[in-house]
Image (cartoon, rainbow, N blue to C red):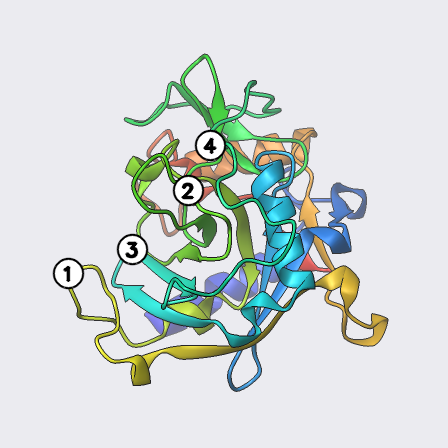
């Protein structure tokens, strides 16, 4: 089996370009102020792209928290198998920095489905899904749109309503997309690099929620900063693949209709969480 997979990989690498292959101009820079760089103990780096267009108040809070060094003494305190990794202040007593809004508006959806692509099939959680031109997955019910809970998406932990979460405690999806959370919690970003440092952590066992039973199990953060506040020499740079072109449309069609030699039965459709907009380190 490994030999067959290797042969397929070599064939793909040496084949002529496909209509779905991007050209260099399809790659667009992600602004440094949209990149949150979180570092776990052991210098394990996690880079998150923030979504200020979809959750402006929550993202403004996150930027203030980063500038204040709020996560420098935070920790991962919940790892729920096939669900989420959650981090922040496990004591819930640490005061928020000046200017951080403790209860932002419920930024759970967006007024318009401004997607430039649309998938062939709907799903149980929306009437349509697609991609924004600037590299985000989107879902809609025909009235409003939202960022779906897919693998590696980042949301704001909160208590029961009317709490909306300040952004001090965040979580990342590490399992099958929990789409039932859509429009119930603010999505503020997506992990672009380093998700393995979260998904590989030991699972928590407390309360059926994946909480760590002992504080000694908590995984500390060293720091959390915006890339724009880091020195140029260590600042990560990323690009997203633009969706507003025929090559991206061809890529979606190919994902919806997988072909031989490996696939024998194309499905004719795909889940939005299986066509997450590609990203890469800037060359």
**Label 1 SS:** loop
**Which is more N-terminal, label 4 or label 3?**
3
- CA–CA distance in space, label 2 to label 1: 26 Å
Q: Are marks 3 and 4 in contact (CB under 8 Å)?
A: no
Q: Are marks 4 and 1 in contact (CB under 8 Å)?
A: no
Q: Give the residue number, with chain letter if any, for mark 4.
A: 106
For the residues marked 3 and 4, what is the alpha-carbon distance in whole angstroms? 22 Å
Does dot 2 land on a helix, a strand or a loop?
A: helix
Label located before the other in sequence (4 or 1): 4
Identity of the residue drawn at 41% across and 64% down = 93
Give percent across and percent down for residue 163: 38, 40
Residue 221 place in picture, x, y as percent: 51, 76
- Give the labeled residue for mark 2: 273
Q: Secondary structure at mark 4?
A: loop
- Work out how far the residue at label 3 is from the one at label 1, CA to CA, in angstroms: 12 Å
Label 2 neighbour load within 10 Å: few <14, some 14-19, many 20+: some
Residue 283: % across, % down:
78, 63
Tell us which disc is closer to us: 3 or 1.
1
* Lower position in the chain sequence, tag 2 or tag 1: 1
Q: Mark 2 or 4 closer to N-term?
A: 4
Can you identify the residue that label 3 sits on? Answer: 83
Mark 2 or mark 1, whichever is nearer to me? 1
């Amino acid at each position: 089996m490994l030999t067959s997979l290797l042969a397929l990989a070599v064939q793909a690498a040496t084949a002529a370009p496909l209509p779905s292959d991007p050209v260099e101009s399809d790659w667009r820079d992600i602004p440094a102020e949209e990149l949150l760089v979180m570092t776990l103990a052991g210098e394990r780096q996690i880079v998150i792209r923030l979504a200020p267009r979809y959750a402006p108040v929550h993202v403004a809070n996150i930027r203030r928290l980063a500038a204040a060094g709020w996560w420098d003494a935070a920790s991962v305190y919940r790892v729920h198998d096939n669900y989420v990794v959650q981090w922040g202040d496990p004591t819930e007593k640490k005061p928020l920095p000046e200017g951080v809004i403790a209860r932002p508006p419920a930024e759970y959806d967006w007024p318009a489905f401004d997607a430039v692509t649309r998938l062939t099939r709907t799903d149980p959680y929306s009437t349509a899904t697609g991609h924004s031109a600037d590299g985000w997955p989107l879902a809609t019910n025909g009235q409003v749109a939202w960022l779906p809970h897919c693998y590696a998406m980042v949301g704001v932990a909160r208590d029961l309503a009317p709490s909306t979460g300040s952004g001090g405690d965040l979580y990342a999806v590490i399992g099958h997309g929990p789409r039932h959370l859509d429009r119930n919690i603010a999505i503020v970003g997506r992990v672009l690099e380093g998700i393995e440092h979260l998904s590989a952590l030991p699972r928590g066992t407390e309360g059926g929620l994946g909480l760590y039973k002992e504080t000694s199990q908590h995984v500390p953060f060293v720091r959390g900063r915006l890339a724009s506040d880091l020195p140029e020499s260590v600042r990560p740079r990323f690009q997203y693949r633009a969706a507003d072109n025929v090559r991206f449309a061809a890529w979606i069609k190919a994902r919806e209709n997988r072909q031989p030699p490996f696939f024998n039965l194309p499905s004719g459709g795909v889940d939005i969480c299986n066509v997450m907009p590609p990203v890469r380190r800037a060359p």
